[in-house]
Amino acid sequence: DGKDGQDGDSMFQSVTQDENYAYFTLADGTIIKIAKGNGNSQSNEDFIFTITYDPNGGEGVIVKDTFYYGYANEIIACPFSKKGYFFTQWNTNPEGRGAPYHYGNNITIDKNITLYAQWEEGTYEYVDLGLSVKWAVCNIGATKQESYGDKFAWGEITPKTTFSWENYSLCNGENKMTKYCTYSGFGTVDYLTILEPCDDAASAILGNNWHMPTDKEIEELLTQCSWEWTAVNNVKGYLITSRTNKNCIFLPAAGFQLDGMSWTAGGGGAYWSNTLNSDNSNNAFCLEFDKDSKSLMGGTLTDRRCGLNIRPVCP
């Protein structure tokens, strides 16, 4: 199947050819010049290829994506899930012995290929706290409950070590948002206030069964659980215990990062939600805490460029 319900030819505005080349004009105006094998005439289908995304033991329906010779497309986020496992990458070999690919990578193909989901066992197990969603045992990028894991800017799916408006992918470098904006003074208005799966690090990295918590799901965690400031293996943070079933998770005080200021790990923590602050499109809501307080915040600390941790949730 072609993208957006289009068939194989519909993205070609015109096709011309001479003795040696075929000239394809795509719907966006791009002209692709392709050498013909031996001077023989070739049809459009000779330049249309398919990437098949295989769940490789996971749950979900095989996805096929149309590519055009010489025309780069992006690798998709994983639409599959596998209980007790989390998605790591795509690979041309089911056992991970081929070429690896990650969501967002650009790829140009000249033949049909299959990419197989790669799964890692156990790390992203969840805990049922008796709330509307289940909370992961550890942060994205961590392998233990007390490990800090990776930090992300809001709406970015790749961790970074430096965070600023200049390297934030969803603005034009001048503090003007290019996506997720409700007021023209902050950038290009689209009225999107919840991260789409392609911009949700939990969905993109772990698969669509996971997502970053909404502001309402964080509020549940705050109001329906007991919070105890403690340490696990000498790492400070909060032990959060369900009042319903006594199950618990641990959120380490991993600090935050932003050029020009920082919050030292151990003193407090900040965790992204997937929810924009619709009153100020430069900000998104996060869970912020230290040993004396905890709250859902949407102000200065939560500039979308900030590097915060992510604790994913699933249904």
Image (spheres, helix red, strand yellow):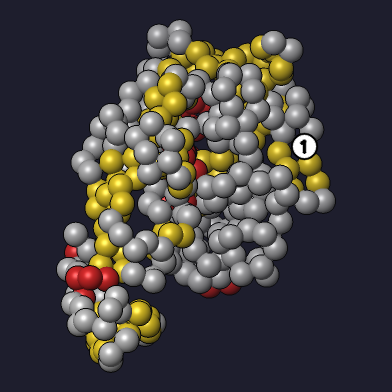
Q: Is residue 204 left or right of residue 138?
A: left
**Quadrant location of the N terminus?**
bottom left
Residue 300 in view in this figure: no
- The image quarter containing residue 71 is bottom left
Graded by Cα atoms within 10 Å as few (under 14), some (14 to 19) or many (20 or more), the crowding at tag 1 reads some
Residue 313 locus on image (x, y percent): 43, 31
Position of 27 relative to 258 (above/below): below
Position of 168 relative to 86 (above/below): below
Q: Nearer the viewer, residue 151 or 81?
A: 81
Residue reaching furthest to the top: 246
Q: Nearer the viewer, residue 123 or 18?
A: 18
Which residue is label 1 attached to?
Answer: 263
Q: At x 68% / y 70%, what residue is drawn?
A: 174
Q: Is residue 71 left or right of residue 229?
A: left
Q: At x 39% / y 17%, what residue is drawn?
A: 128
Residue type marked 1:
Trp
**Quadrant location of the C terminus?**
top left
Residue 276 locus on image (x, y percent): 51, 52
- SS assignment at label 1: strand
- The image quarter containing residue 30 is bottom left
Q: Is residue 251 left or right of residue 218?
A: right
Q: How many marks?
A: 1
Position of 128 relative to 164 (above/below): above
Residue 264 in view in this figure: yes
Residue reaching furthest to the front: 38
Q: At x 32% / y 43%, what residue is drawn?
A: 79
Q: At x 32% / y 28%, what residue is drawn?
A: 82
Q: Is residue 112 left or right of residue 87?
A: left
Residue 14 locus on image (x, y percent): 25, 87
Residue 222 locus on image (x, y percent): 52, 26
